[in-house]
Image: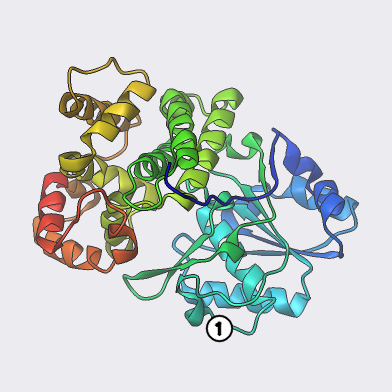
Amino acid sequence: MSAFSFQTVPHILVEPGLARRLGALLRERHAGARAVLVSDNFLNRSGALQPALTSLAASGWQTLVIDDVVADPPEAVVQAAAERARAFDADVVIGFGGGSSMDVAKLVALLCNSDQPLHAMYGVNQVQGQRLPLIQVPTTAGTGSEVTPISIVTTGATTKSGVVAPQLYADAAFLDAELTVGLPPAATAATGVDAMVHAIEAYTSKRLKNPLSDHLAILALQLLTANLITVCRDGANLQARSNMLLGAMLAGQAFANAPVGGVHALAYPVGGIFHVPHGLSNALVLPAVLRFNALAAAPLYAELGTAVGLPPAADAARGATTFISFLEDLIRQAELPRGLRAVGIVESDLPTLASAAMAQQRLLMNNPVPIDKAQALDIYRAAY
């Protein structure tokens, strides 16, 4: 066995309804009296935060709610949130929401406890110093951000940058499936496919693939594929919601250690340039990237197919083809748009996407097969 390392969040609690006792859970492990809860305006207006806020107050926490997080959060949102949290003299930071809220919470916890500017943190292992205590409470089953050391920030009109550092691992991830029950079918489908992509790309990562991440990726993919259509059609099914939330977290643990590759690299420009939600961007390019990767990754795709219950194939190539078709059928059943043209992209946009994808070398280096600009254009054409 090759040497490897594996890191994850030290405390994970999975319990429907735990948001109603969030204050007491924090009090068990963290001192202080001032909590900052980072979320989005929709969750705040809908009342979804209220049980958690009531619990925090009952346990003696004075809480500042920062609810201006938006999808693909720009630097200005991160900076403003950090300034408010710093002025509040926060003792602990809570990320409560989807991936964007949790990503912002990570950086708020860092910026409150460090003089290092945000722009100096971009890249891998560029963070200096330590953060405030950080708790993550996901309300979607998708990004796995609650257990990853990654935060993605929009840094220009069409560009994103990542902060990747071990300081971004939270102190705890609290998984409450009740918080995901109200997620609309389209968002449920897109975030679910995002989590599936995390598992698939972790299992096939050219760099840092390891036995622990493999095990987590397989279990994640089994949970996600078995429950995706159920939660899309019956959003109140708490058991299926719990399985999706657990699957997304396991996939997050997997790709935090065996990083994602070409699907994400080609999905980011679709989201950044055309403002397509991240999970949907992944779904749009997934089959085309996997077919390209099958040149090298067919045996691994065949293994994943067997893991999710597909019959064993006569050879790896046929097993990979069957697995990719299985994923396409799941995307169809989930009623997600199919093909880049379905989200308003025209064929003349494809060279721009291919050029933009080349900026994602942090991800492309993990792909089972190298992807250059010409090959990226071919993949986008296949996904069109």
Residue at 24 percent across and 32 percent down: it is 299
- Residue 44, image quadrant: bottom right
Relative height, residue 196 to residue 23 (above, below): above
Q: How many marks?
A: 1
Relative height, residue 31 to residue 155 (above, below): above
Residue at 21 percent across and 34 percent down: it is 298
Please provide percent x and percent y for residue 137: 65, 49
Please provide percent x and percent y for residue 334: 35, 31
Q: Which residue is mark 1?
A: 117
Please provide percent x and percent y for residue 127: 55, 74
Front one among 323 and 270: 323
Residue at the front extreme? 1
Circle 1: residue type: Pro
Residue at 59 percent across and 45 percent down: it is 139
Relative height, residue 375 to residue 125 (above, below): above
Q: Secondary structure at mark 1?
A: loop
Please provide percent x and percent y for residue 162: 44, 67
- Residue 80, image quadrant: bottom right
Front one among 336 and 250: 250
Q: Position of 352 compared to 232: left or right? A: left
Q: Position of 142 compared to 297: left or right? A: right
